Image (cartoon, rainbow, N blue to C red):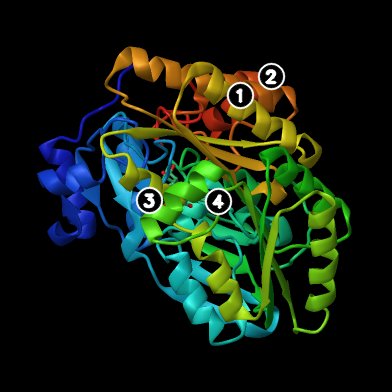
Amino acid sequence: MGYGKVTERGLGVIRKIVGSERMSTGESILDLHGKDESFHPRRRPEVVVWPIRAEEISQILKMANEERIPVTPWGAGTSLEGNPIPVEGGIVLDLQRMNRILELMEKDLQVRVEAGVVYKELNQYLSRFGLFFPPDPGTAATLGGMVGNNASGVRTIKYGATKDFVLNMVVVLASGEIVRVGTHAVKSSSGYDLCRLFVGSEGTLGVVTEVTLRLVGLPEGFMAAVVQFGTIRQATDTVSHIMRSGLSPAALELLDAQTVRVVNAYKKLSLEERPTLFIEFQSASSAGLREELEVVKEVCQENGCLKFDSGVGREERNRLWEARYDVHEAIKVSHPGLSPLVIDTAVPISKYPDMVEWGQRVLEKRGLNGYIFGHAGSGNLHMEILGVPEVKTEWQKVQEAGEEIVGFSLECNGTSTGEHGIGIGKRKFMKREHGGSLLIMKQIKDLLDPNGILNPGKIFE
Ligand SMILES: Cc1cc2nc3c(=O)[nH]c(=O)nc-3n(C[C@H](O)[C@H](O)[C@H](O)COP(=O)(O)OP(=O)(O)OC[C@H]3O[C@@H](n4cnc5c(N)ncnc54)[C@H](O)[C@@H]3O)c2cc1C
């Protein structure tokens, strides 16, 4: 059975719920909510709504569920797999106006926020109290979008991903029912972990309106190093040696020589164009960081590093890490007219050197232009393979390379996506990655959203 359309009557119902100023059918608004940061084609919704209360979302979902109209939650639209693209049209719920920090429980190291809060703004606020929320996708992401994709990033290696910080949430189900899942306890063995079920569900199981997060104390001491190698194998071998050495880096990132080149050009930097590791350590104080620096230097030298540049303190860290940021932007600007297929595999750390080498070989073998970088300490490899999606034969080559790279990750008992989610792009790997348990995921989806109205066309093929 097909999906229903948003009729004039439907628009009238929505208008009664939110008022005419918090909904739009304007062309440019529909366009803006029809595309994320991926290559996947734009698909406009029929109406965009900016709710400010869970009750409004509940009423809209009740109406949509009765008429089988698709509803897609929207955070900031920064996804890389087509996750929030409303491929079946319908209603987009843009949560950005639900952006209040509701309650700081300073003594409990917890904060309760609405889903539209931007995590960078949350961290600015929290810094005044010496606290922070560590998962960091590096974009203008909202908490709802981070929960949707179970976002993580450079600091996952030390602190964990979004799922490790969500204590409880308010979720509106497809039926319109409003439920709270989870508690304020930082540990619990009480029944099924429904909170984690919704984290990473990409808006396909419910609309998150409120999130309570666990926080950590803001570190005072910082130490950073930028380490350069003759070969990428030396760099990636060093990663697993560092991880096994008893050190606990706060970040451990890899850039291949080609990526250093493109960032140098974009940011007018002069880093030597070699495989490079960016390392960071954090601590409650500066004492002890220098000892860690000595150990990490030793490990890098044993692995044949050519250059080891380091510094202690926040300013030194920011100086040394300058080249790690804006990689995606640098690649985009250097290749106008080309789009990247983004690889996001993650493998057990001992397999990381082989994973990276495999990716490099696939590019060479197929004569493709691509960049290799990633959150190496978490075994997370990013590659951006360039092509023109509209040129079918060329893009087919890019897609096949992507499949070969993800295939290797799955052979290593890894995953097709470490942090970006399944969206549209990685659906084809779900069966291979999850086998029989994919059926359980489908049964959960059918139970919570029997009419399939929530973000249809995602996760499952
Ligand atoms: C340059 C660049 C770098 C990136 N680096 C990283 C990185 O290091 N780590 C990382 O994890 N990601 C990264 N991303 C991807 C992206 O920024 C994150 O996944 C981010 O968390 C998405 O947040 P958003 O607010 O933009 O969500 P959207 O893109 O708007 O939505 C994401 C998903 O969540 C759903 N959703 C949104 N809000 C809600 C809600 N309230 N309730 C239920 N579902 C909801 C949407 O339907 C969609 O499926 C990067 C993206 C770019 C462009």
Q: Look at mark 3 in the image and give the residue it sits on.
A: 329
Query: Which callout, 4 or 3, points to the residue nearer the camera?
Result: 3
Q: Position of residue 153 (x, y in %)?
A: 58, 54
Q: Quadrant of residue 387?
A: top left
**Left/right of residue 49 with respect to residue 187 in the rendered view:** left
Q: Residue 151 got which mark?
A: 4
Name the mark nearer the viewer: 4 or 1: 1
Amino acid at dot 3: Glu
Looking at the rendering, which quadrant does residue 98 occupy?
Answer: bottom left
* Residue on which disc 2 sits: 435
Relative to 307, is 453 on the left or the right?
A: left
Q: Is mark 3 within 8 Å of ligand 1?
A: yes
Numbered badge on residue 361: 1
Find the residue positioned furthest to the bottom.
Answer: 128
Cα distance, mark 2 to mark 4?
Answer: 24 Å
Residue in the foreground of this view, choosing between 237 and 446? 237
Q: Position of residue 297 (x, y in %)?
A: 80, 63
